C-alpha cells in the first residue's frame, strides 16, 4: 500500500467553474490518505457536447498526462465519454480511469437495470458509443437527456436538477431503471439531492472514478503494455510541442 | 467517509484452507482503515466446480449475509461465478460484490482485450454465463482452463501456478489477451508470480473485490431497492431456519 | 419407443394448490401412454418471486431428481425460470426440461415475434436472464408483468386472467407479439380462455414441457456428459443428507 | 388429444433415395398413433447445396403444403435450412416445423454447448443464417462441414459417416461441443453409429422434427395469424398454377 | 473505367407501373455514361408483401439474371428485402446489389441513427431479417409501417406520401432517427417531397442501388467465388427450363 | 447531376509519400467528370498506429474540412479507422466518407464472409472498434495484421505485399474469408497484385471511398443535421485558430 496516493483529475473541458465543481466532488470522495489535484487542459473547448468538441479537447487532456506522469499515481479523465482514455493508457503505465466507465461499474454493482442521464439531446449517439466501448451495451437499459447545455450544469444548477429529476422519473417509469449515472462531470454533487427525490441510487461519476483510481493504485496494478496500450512509437508529429513528441517519451 | 469500513468476505465453499488463503489476500489488499472478517458458510460443498456444487453452496452463502447484516458495511462473495449475488443484494441494502465482476472491472480498466483463466474444464459454460451476467460478453476475449481441481489451487500450489502459466501463454499468443483475471478464489496470491512470468497484469479477484467494497462504502452507496433487489416478500420457506424466513427480515 | 413413458413433473415451490394445478395441466397434455407424477420439493419457498426464493428452492428441486432417478424417464422442472436445470442435468442422464425453455421453443415454432407474460414486476430481470440462458435474447420481443403474486395465480384466478388479458393486449398493440408464453406454472390452464380473448396462441408452459419430455424420451436421447453436465465430482457437502452427497451418486 | 396424428414430411429436394431415407427415420421416430407420409416436391433440385438450389426448391415445397392442407395435422420441412418455413406458416394454421430448428431445440435441452455438422463447405453461410433465423446465434458454438455433397450422404454412406466422425472429433476437441445436430436430412439414420463413435448426443434432425410436430398437434396449437404469418393477400402470381394463387386459398 | 456501364435493374414483382416508376428513379440517378434497362420477371406475384410472395418471386428474378449475364455489367434487385440476392451472386461474377442494402449503406454515411419506413404491417419481421442479413442490426434504430399495400405506392401516391410522413414524424420524435430509407421500390421518387416535409435525408433505395452498381463496376470488382457464392454445381432441377439448369451454366 | 464532382481526399497522416500514393489510387478510381484533390493535414503524426497518433491527427484532419467547405462537394478521410469522421460530419452538410466504412460496404456486396488485413499488431483493438462503429460486428469474420509499420507500406512495398499475402492466406484457410479490405491507406494500389495472388476480391479502401463520395454527391444527399451531426454550438475553444472556432462557422 503506498503511503499516500496522488491522483490527478483532469476536467475534459476548459470551463474553470466546472474544474472547481469536479474538484469538490473528487476531494469529498477520496480516502484521507489520498491527495487529489484537479486541473483542466490548457487548450480545448469550454464544454464537450459534440464530437468536434471532444476531438479538440483530447490533445489537451493527453498533454495533462504527459506533463505530470512522474508526479501522480493515477489519472482520472473527468468527462462522461472518457475522451482519449485509450490514448492516455498508451502514454503511461499508471492507471487511467474515465468517469463514464467508473460510474457504470458502480451502477452495475448496485442495480440489475440502470441508465444514464445527461445533457444535450445531440449526445445520444456519443453516449451509446461510450457504453459500447466500456462493454455494457447489454446492461444499460436507458439513456435520457435533459436538453440543457453542459455549461448550465454549473451556472443553472436548479434547472439542471429539475431537468434531471424529470428525465429520471421517466427512466424509472418507462425504462424500469433502478439506478442512474450522472452522465456529465458538471452534474457532480447533484447526486445526493437527486437520490432523495428519485429514491434510487444516483452515481456521481467523478466520485466513482476517484474510488476506482484509489483501488487500482492500492492494488499496484498498471496498464497493460502487451499490445493495444504500448507506448506510441517514435515518429514526428507536426504542430505539437516537444514534450508531446513520442521520441521524447521516457522508454 | 466512515471512521472505519467493515467488510465481510465470504468464501463460497467450506474448504478451510481456502478461507485462510482468501483472508490473506483480502487483508493484504485493504486500506489501513478497513477491517475484514473472512468466513465460510456452515453448509455447502468443499469446492464449487459444478452447477450442483454452486446451488448447494448458495443457501449457506446467503445465511452468512443474513446473520451479520448489522455488523458489516459491505459483503464480498469470494467465489468466481459470484454465486447468489443477486439474492444477496435482495437481503441487504449494504453493497454486495462478487469477485468475478470486480476482477472484470479491474481488467477492463487496464487492458483492451482480457480473459479469464480458471480450474476444471467443465466450468467453461459457468464462466461464460458469469461473464454475460456481469455484462462483458463483448469484452472478454478468452476463457481457458487448467483442468486442475479447485482444492488443488491450495494444496498443489506449484502445479496450479504452472498450469496457469501454460494456459496464460496460450491466451496471450492465440487470443491476444493483455490481462487475465484469476477465475478462482483459490488462486488468490498467485497474481504476483504469474505477472512476473507472463508480463501482463494478472488480477487477484479477491483483492479486486475488496477494493470495490471499500469504494462503494466510501461512496455511501446502497443497493437499489427499486425493483429487482427488493427484500424478498414474507412467505413460508419450508426446511430453513427462522432467521432465513423472510417474515423475520427487518423491514 | 418405450412401452410407457414415465415423467416426473416437479413444481418448483411448495404451494400444494399449485402442484395440483400443474398436475392437471400435465395430465391433460400427455399422450395416452405417458404416466406423470407431479410432486413438490420437501423444502423451499411457497412461491418463487425473487432470487432468494429461487436459490432456496433449488436444493429441494434437485433432491426430487436424486430421489427418483431410476423410476422416471424424464424430469420437468415446473417453474418459469427453470431453476436449477443445469444442476439437474448434471445429476442424471435422463432428459431434464424446464418449462420456460419448452414454452419458448413452442412459441418460436408458432410465431415470428413472441413474448412472455408473468407475475410480479420485480421478476423482470430474472425473466430476461432466463431468456438469455435459453438462447432467445434476439427472438423474444416483449416481457410484461401483471404485478400479481404467484400464489394468487391459483387463489385469485379471475384477477390473474384479467391481469394477463390486460398486459397481453399491450404486448400485442405495442410490442407486436404474435404469441405469448405464460411465464408462471401457476398460470397453467388459463391458456384456452386467454387464447379466446386475445386471439393469438398462448403457450401453457407446463404442457409444452411435458411434450418436450415425451419427445426426448421417445428419441432415446440422454443429457450429454461430455463436459458441462458431467456428474458432480465426489466431495463433502456440509449440511446436506447422505443421498445428496456426490460420493453416493451412482457412477 | 386427436385420435391419430397425421404428419406430412416433405423432403426439400427431389432425390428419391433421400425421400426414402427420411421416411425411414420419420417412421422410426413417431409414436404408434402417428401416421406419417413422406413426399418430395414435384419440382426442384436434386439436392440443396446453394442458395440457388434452395430458392428453386421452395415453390415446390410450398406446393406440397397447399395440396394437402386438409389431410394433415402438421407439416415437417425436411431440409436443414428450413427452406420456405416462414411462407409455409403463412399458408396454413397447421404447425409447420423445420428440421433445423427442431434439432437445435433438442440439442439445447441436452447440452450447454452444441454445434452443427453438415455437407459442402460452401454452406457455411447458409447454416449461419439458419441458426440466426431460429434465434440461437449465442448458443451454437461450432459449425463444421465434411465437404461431401448431399447426394453422397445417401450413396456414399460410409464415407459420409467417416467424414462426420472426423469433423465431429474436431468439434469436440477444438470447439468443446457436447452435442451435435446432423445438418442434412440425408444424414438421418447415422446418429446411432456416430453417437457410439463420438460419445456425445447426435441429433437426427428429421426425428427431432417429427417429435415437435406431434407435440404441437397434441397441444392443439396453431400458427399465429396475428401479423407475420397471415394468409397471403389475394393477388395474381404469374406463371404459377391455380391452386397456388392466393385468390383461391380458403379464407 | 469501362467506356459505358450497363446495368440491369430488376423489379422484384410483376406490376408494370412499378417497373416504370423504378425505371424513372434509376434513370434519374445514374451517371451520363450509364445505360440502364429496367425489367420485371416473367413469373411471380404482383407485389411482395409476404414470405410466400417473396419466395414465388425469386425464381423469376434469378431468371432475369441468367438470361442476360453477358449483356450487363451489374444487376440491381429492386425490391426492399433483396429477394434472392445471395442466389443471384452465385449465378454471376458481375456485381449484384439489393436496394435494401444499398439504402442502408447510404443512410449509414449520412446519419448516426437511421430507420426504415415501409408498407404493410405484416412485413415487420421480413424487414428485421433483411437488416440482420445485411449486417446492420446494431445500427438501424427504427422500423415503421404505414399499413398501405405495395401496389398503392403507385396507385395511391398521395395517401402513401401522407402515410410515410406520419410514420416518419413518429420515427423522428420517438426513435430519434436522423435519416430514413424508403423500404419499398414503389416509394421511389417520393424522397424529395418527404425530405422537404420531414427535414431529414430520405433515401430512395433504387437510386442508392444504381450508384452502388456504378461504383462496383467502375472499381472492376467481381463477386467472390471463393466459397458461398460459387456457381451452383450441376444437378437436375425438375420443373425448370433448360437455361435455368446449372449443367448449362457457363463455367 | 452536378456538371462536375469535386472531392477532397484527406490523408489522415502527414507522410507525403502516402499522400501521393493515395492520390494515385483516388485519381485512378474516379469517374471522368470527377476532380479530386488529395491533401494532408498541416499538423499531425507521420503515421497513425496508436490511439495517440489518431487523436493528434484528428484536429488537423478536421481543419482540412473547415478550410475548404465551399470548394468541394464531398470529403474522404483516407485513413482506415475513419478518424474524426463523426466530427467532420458535424462541420459540413457535404457528405464525408471514411475509407474504412466504404471498404466494408464494398466487401459486403461482394462476399458473405469478409475480413480486414492491416499493419501493426497493436491496432487490433482499433480495428475492432472501427468495425463496430460502422455497424458490421456481426459480418466481419477476420482481422489479421502483418506487424509491418504504416510508413513501410510505402517504403517497403514488396515486404508489405508479402506480409499481406501471408496473412491473407491464413484468413482464407482458417477464417474462411471470401474477400478482404486493405486496412490502411498506404496499401492502396496493392489490391490488383494481391487479388491475383489470393484469388479473392481485395478492396482498395481509398478507391472504394471515392466511389461512395461520387455516389452521394450524385444523389444530392447531405449529412443529416437532425441530431448527432448538428453544427457544433458556438463556444470558445482555447488554443485553436479563429477558423476553427465554432462561433465563426457559417450557420
Image (tube, coloured by chain):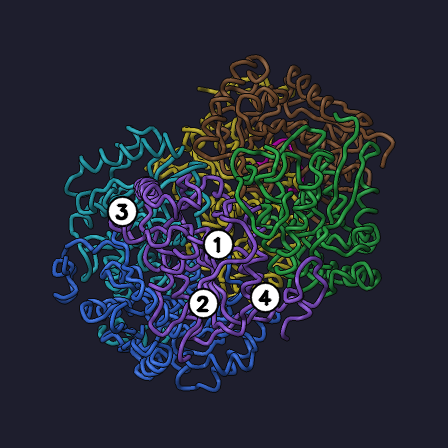
Chain colours: A cyan, B yellow, C brown, D green, E purple, F blue
Q: Residues within 10 Å of mark 1 (few under 14, many from 20)?
A: some
Are the residues under badges 2 and 3 in a single subunit? no
Q: Report the residue at 52% width, 79% height from top.
A: F195
Mark 1 to mark 3 CA distance (whole Å)? 39 Å
Which residue is under mark 1?
B139
Q: Secondary structure at mark 3?
A: helix
> Looking at the image, can residue A105 be seen?
no
Q: Chain of mark 2?
A: F
Q: Report the residue at 35% width, 82% height from top.
A: F24
Which residue is under mark 4?
E90
Which residue is under mark 2?
F106
User: In this view of the protein, which residue sits in the foreground, C115 or C133?
Assistant: C115
**Which numbered disc, 1 or 2, marks the residue closer to the eye?**
2
Q: Residues within 10 Å of mark 4 (few under 14, many from 20)?
A: many
Mark 2 to mark 3 CA distance (whole Å)? 30 Å
D182 inside magenta stretch: no
* Magenta-highlighted residues: B39-48
Which of the marked residues, 4 or 3, is nearer the chain's N terminus? Answer: 4
Q: Residues within 10 Å of mark 2 (few under 14, many from 20)?
A: many
Marker disc for residue E198? 3
Q: Secondary structure at mark 4?
A: helix
Q: Residue furthest right?
A: C3
Mark 1 to mark 4 CA distance (whole Å)? 36 Å
> Looking at the image, can residue B142 be seen?
yes
The quarter of the displayed image where residue F177 is located: bottom right
Are the residues under badges 1 and 2 in a single subunit? no
Tell me whether circle 4 and circle 3 mark residues in contact (CB < 8 Å). no
Amino acid at each position: 500500500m503506498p503511503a499516500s496516493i496522488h491522483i490527478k483529475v483532469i476536467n475534459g473541458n476548459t470551463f474553470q467553474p466546472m474544474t472547481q465543481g469536479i474538484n469538490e466532488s473528487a476531494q469529498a470522495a477520496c480516502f484521507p490518505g489520498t491527495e487529489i489535484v484537479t486541473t483542466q487542459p490548457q487548450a480545448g473547448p469550454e464544454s464537450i457536447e459534440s464530437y468536434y468538441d471532444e476531438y479538440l479537447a483530447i490533445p489537451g487532456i493527453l498533454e495533462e498526462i504527459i506533463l505530470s506522469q512522474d508526479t501522480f499515481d493515477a489519472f482520472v479523465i473527468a468527462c462522461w465519454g472518457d475522451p482519449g482514455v485509450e490514448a492516455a493508457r498508451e502514454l503511461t503505465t499508471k492507471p487511467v480511469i474515465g468517469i463514464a466507465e467508473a460510474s457504470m461499474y458502480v451502477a452495475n454493482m448496485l442495480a440489475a437495470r440502470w441508465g444514464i442521464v445527461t445533457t444535450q439531446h445531440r449526445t445520444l449517439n456519443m453516449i451509446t458509443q461510450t457504453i459500447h466501448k466500456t462493454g455494457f451495451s447489454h446492461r444499460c437499459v436507458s439513456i435520457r437527456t435533459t436538453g440543457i447545455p453542459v455549461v448550465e450544469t454549473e451556472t443553472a444548477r436548479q434547472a439542471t436538477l429539475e431537468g434531471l429529476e424529470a428525465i429520471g422519473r421517466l427512466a424509472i417509469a418507462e425504462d424500469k431503471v433502478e439506478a442512474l449515472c450522472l452522465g456529465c462531470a458538471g452534474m457532480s454533487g447533484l447526486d445526493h439531492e437527486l437520490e432523495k427525490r428519485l429514491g434510487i441510487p444516483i452515481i456521481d461519476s467523478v466520485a466513482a472514478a476517484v474510488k476506482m483510481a484509489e483501488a487500482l493504485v492500492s492494488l499496484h496494478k498498471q496498464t497493460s503494455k502487451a499490445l493495444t496500450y504500448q507506448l506510441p512509437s517514435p515518429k514526428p508529429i507536426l504542430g505539437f510541442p516537444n514534450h508531446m513528441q513520442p521520441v521524447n517519451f521516457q522508454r
